[in-house]
Amino acid sequence: MELIIQLISGALGGNVAGSLLKKFSLGTVGNSILGILGGGIGGKVLGMLGMGAAAAAGADGGLDIASILSNLASGGVGGGVLMAVVGMIKNAMSK
């Protein structure tokens, strides 16, 4: 369940970042795909660092409001960051 939340919030984060950073936007489909990838990766990396949903849920691994919010935040940030990085690389390569 955590992964699904991270992927959906990653897609949203990628599209929000694309709308805020028009210069780096890759279009709705590109932003969504990179957001989904970034959401999954970002959620797992933050979880391994102890800042993700696993730390918020505690040892039982349950889905409470803290773990859901943690998944939303880590997925959204991961999606937005990956979309922005790929957009910057794309712009740099086109010059």
Image (cartoon, rainbow, N blue to C red):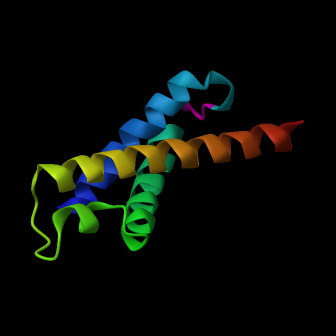
Magenta residue check for 19: no
Q: Which residues are magenta?
A: 25-29
Looking at the picture, tell me which residue is in the foreground, 37 or 70.
70
Where residue 63 appears, as percent x and y from the top left, is: 10, 60
Image point (10%, 75%), residue name: 60
**Number of marks in picture:** 0
Tell me if I can see residue 61 in this picture: yes
Residue 33 seen in render: no
Give how far across and how far down residue 29 sits, in percent: 47, 38
- Residue at 51 percent of width and 32 percent of height: 17
Residue 61 coordinates in the image, percent (x, y): 14, 71
| Closer-to-camera residue (74/19) | 74
Q: Main secondary structure of the magenta part?
A: helix
| Residue 72 percent coordinates (x, y) | 29, 46
Q: Is residue 95 left or right of residue 47?
A: right
16 in relation to 4, above or below: above
- Which of these two is toward me, 18 or 42? 42
Q: Magenta stretch: residue 27 in it?
A: yes
The image quadrant that residue 81 belongs to is top right
| Residue 18 sits above or below residue 32 on the image | above
Q: Residue at x 84, y 38 (%)?
A: 94
Image quarter hosting the N terminus: bottom left
Q: Quadrant of the C terminus?
A: top right
Name the residue: 84% across, 44% down.
93
Q: Nearer the viewer, residue 71 or 90?
A: 71
Q: Residue furthest bottom?
A: 59
Is residue 71 toward the left or the right of residue 41 in the image? left
